[in-house]
Amino acid sequence: MHISKEVLEKLGIKETKQVETPQTLHEAIQAQKELELGMIKSGIDRFHKGINKAKSKYNKKGKPRETSESITIYGQQMAQEGLEPMNNAINEYFIKATDGHATKFASEAIILSKCIPIKDIENKNPERWSAISFITLKSVLDSITIGSAQTKAILKIGGAIEDEARLGYFKDQNTKVYQLTKEWLKKGKKQNYRHNRKVFAHAMNKQNLEWEGFSKEEKVKVGKLLLELLILHTGFVEFSNKYSQGKIYKYVIATKKTLDWIEKKKFHAEILKPERKPMIITPKDWTTPYDGGYYIKELRPEGLGSTLGEDTSNNQPKQEEENNAL
């Protein structure tokens, strides 16, 4: 049945192009491959749209927002790779600063001690610092490719560390209410840092739990320490001086090695999540448990969890190569 252009316009529907039905098997396969290429392109566009959104300093309404590159595919892998060296670096610093000989960084060590459970103070396992390491990494990785002023980076780390100490205090003082608040937040629709912070603060106030917080000087001290440890022990970022109107401004920027790795990671990752659509012809025959379904293999899910899957055991050396490059 043909629907006139006038009727389509009244319904707010754009007139669609007439598509010729493939007459031969060869034409049908070609049409399917073109469809699959479109799926890959749509996936690539969606991938880069997500990255651009994470890097954007403004929301849809034009209001300022914090960048969030730590949630990107490269940000997540960098956080994983940086966790162990950061744990070891903080642990080494803390042991030296509290062995009775060091005095220069004793105040930073006192601040750090407020961020872990009391029972872990004497525990020398580096993993006790996992939360602090992750917070530091996330704070820096949120703006890894666009950079950040040094002061802003330091205060962001210091503020996040203060929040961690506050939650630790809440948990020690009233574990039951802390857990109930945490579970309530998991069920809620809002899943952002600022909202969670307000909810925890409200719960603490209802329980009459007073938290003095860190002074600006304390936040600067601990933020500066953790940023310097991250630069020294991960190599992800470095300090850079920028000159403007006769003044020197210090920034935290990704190293060239880091930026090169991120570009390679994006290049290899952009085709991993295509926008899969139903096939227009019979799926390709399975000659093995891994090679059937779509005609373009990049559209077949990895692993053995799907009937459209393909064995990915040969990809392991490639993943290890990426990790070593980082």
Image: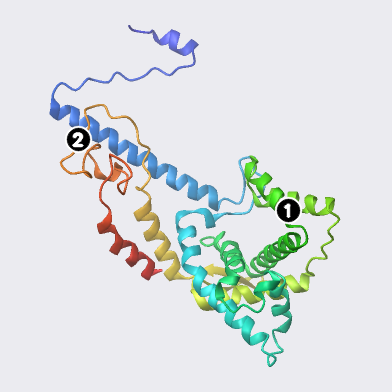
- The mark closer to the camera, 1 or 2, is 1
Task: Give how far apart the Cα atoms at labels 1 and 2 are.
Answer: 55 Å
Tell me which residue sits at (24%, 41%) in the image.
296
In the picture, measured across the screen, residue 120 lies left or right of residue 309, that is right
The circle on residue 284 is 2
Tell me which residue sits at (34%, 7%) in the image.
2
Query: If the image is split into quadrants, where does the N terminus sit?
Result: top left
Between 236 and 324, the one nearer to me in the picture: 324
Q: Indicate the amino acid at tag 1.
A: Lys
Q: How many numbered marks does the figure carry?
A: 2
Picture layout, residue 179 above or below residue 215: above
Asked where in the image residue 189 lies, by quadrant, the reply is top right
According to the picture, the residue beneath numbered tag 1 turns out to be 176
How was the colour assigned to the protein in this rendering? rainbow
Residue 248 visible to an observer of this rendering: no
Q: Give residue 222's position: percent from left, percent from top.
A: 69, 74
Q: Give residue 173's position: percent from left, percent from top.
A: 78, 61
Mark 1 or mark 2: which comes first in sequence?
1
Q: Give residue 261's position: percent from left, percent from top.
A: 40, 64
Q: Indicate the amino acid at tag 2.
A: Lys
The circle on residue 107 is none
Tell me which residue sits at (51%, 68%) in the image.
83
| Mark 1 burial class by Cα count in 10 Å: few <14, some 14-19, many 20+ | few
Tag 2's secondary structure?
loop
Between 263 and 106, the one nearer to me in the picture: 106
